[in-house]
Image (cartoon, rainbow, N blue to C red):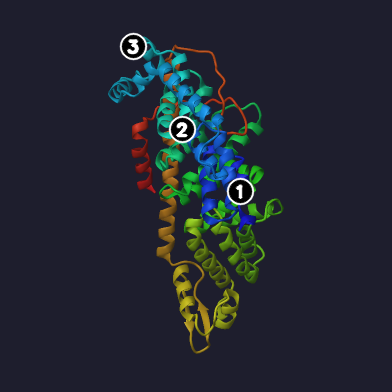
Amino acid sequence: MSKYDLTNKLAERLDRHMVLPLLQFLSEQRVYKEADLRAARLQLVQSTSMVDTAIDEYKAVHGVQQAPKAMLERKKAVIQRLKDAQKETQRIVAVVEDEALVQRLQNEDAYHLASLAQRHKISAEDVSQLYRFAKLKFDCGLYGDSAKFLHHVRLLAPDDDMKFHALWGKLASEILMLNWGAALEDVYALQDAIDQRGFATPLEQLRHRTWLVHWSLFVFFNVEGGLDKLVHFCFQDTIINTIRTNSPYLLRYVAAAVLLNGRKSHLKDLVDAMRAEEDEFDDPLADFMINLHFKFDFQGAHAQVPEVAKLLEADFFLRDHREAIIKESRTLIFTTYCKIHRVIALGELASVLDLDEQKDEKEIVQLIRDARMDAKIDSSTNSLVIGAHFPPIYRQVIDRVESIGSRTSDLSDLVDRKLLAKETQDDDASSTDTAPAVSFNNYNNNNNKNYNNRNNNRRYNNSNNRNNRRGRRY
């Protein structure tokens, strides 16, 4: 199974904290030797401030009861850093943790740095200290506090780079807390920020989009209705071009979403992308799609199904969907084969699908039902008779209505984001407080960059409610 594992490639574009669940999954599935995985986890957590976890991993790897003195000293140093940071941010933390005060200021449109400087003596340096405290909290594995503080940093920071930086950190925190609704909001906010920012080079913008696509996999494969959202997200021109250019192996997840979301309208675009990048990666799911929809090699496509099953067993994002994907793969072979025939001998169909002609007539009937096809078995000729290839009118109406609902939701989200961006511009124009730009370290462990972002005035406590409304529209 290890030959289909993408963890090494994914980890290059993920935060270190996000890699830990992937390593835990590989351990549970026994994809690699346990000793190697423990050593990898130890190396990973030692690069963070999760000192208790590092000590536990060290004891497990080396089979000892006592951690080295250096690790214990580092633990003391981290605890002291937390105490110092808490003391430095005491004034601003008291403000942002007072929910009644924050609510009142937001109702008055006074929750910005200029107002807080006048009323509560909060300065730009206080916001910078809160940002650094949130980053330290994140590095220690205290994701809840980090997400809360970074939300307020995004509302109060006078520096656009800090706001954009805080948004990356907040998305990571929400993902690691499994807050999929809030994380989805942050994915869309980051997408807008990346689109709107003037990067130094197109390559830098491409790098940010690549990170976003990787991070968003956690969200789309867990949030309600996420597979439909993933399809819409990935087939935007900027995103599909990013995948094809920088990470074609992610087409595996696009293919899985297309198979599972019930509508196959993007199959042609998907197969074209896979064919173009065929030499760049080896993936059984891609081979399956190409064999079926380009080469029309039904035997070859069917031969890939067992390999696809092995792939799914070793994939962190797809394992929970393995049964549905295998079922949809077999149904897709059946429907595609039937589209080019009017009458099919059951023996021929059994050969294509690797079925027992005598025993598996019930399975063929089930495939007909799953595919919602107008077909029947003619016992006198021992064949399958295919009716009209176009779906009945009621199915066409249902598909159109479902498509309209999805597009309407996308347009509504776009309008919401544009209105919020305009409100942010108005708020920024009314603020007179300025501060020099400050460089910060990116939460992504690959590169240190400066970013900027449009401010987002959505209230943190209401983000899940807004996401629920979006879910009902879908």
Q: Which residue lies at the image location 44% right of the left edge and 71% below the top edge?
A: 369
- Identify residue type, mark 2: Lys
The N terminus, quarter of image: bottom right
Name the residue beneath numbered marker 1.
36
Q: Position of residue 55 (x, y in %)?
A: 51, 37
Q: Quadrant of residue 185?
A: top left
Depth check: 36 or 215 in front?
Answer: 36
The residues bearing labels 3 and 1 have C-alpha atoms spaced at a distance of: 56 Å
Viewer-proximal residue, 301 or 398? 301
Q: Secondary structure at mark 1?
A: helix
Question: What residue is disc 3 on?
Answer: 119
Residue 32 visible here: yes
- Disc 3 on helix, strand or loop? helix
- Above/below status of 92 relative to 332: above
Mark 2 vs 3, N-terminal side = 3
Residue under label 2: 170
For the residues labelled 2 and 3, say whether their Cβ atoms are less than 8 Å apart: no
Check whether the beta carbons of the residues at disc 1 and disc 2 lie within 8 A of each other: no
- Amino acid under label 1? Asp
Residue 232: x and y in percent read 50, 47
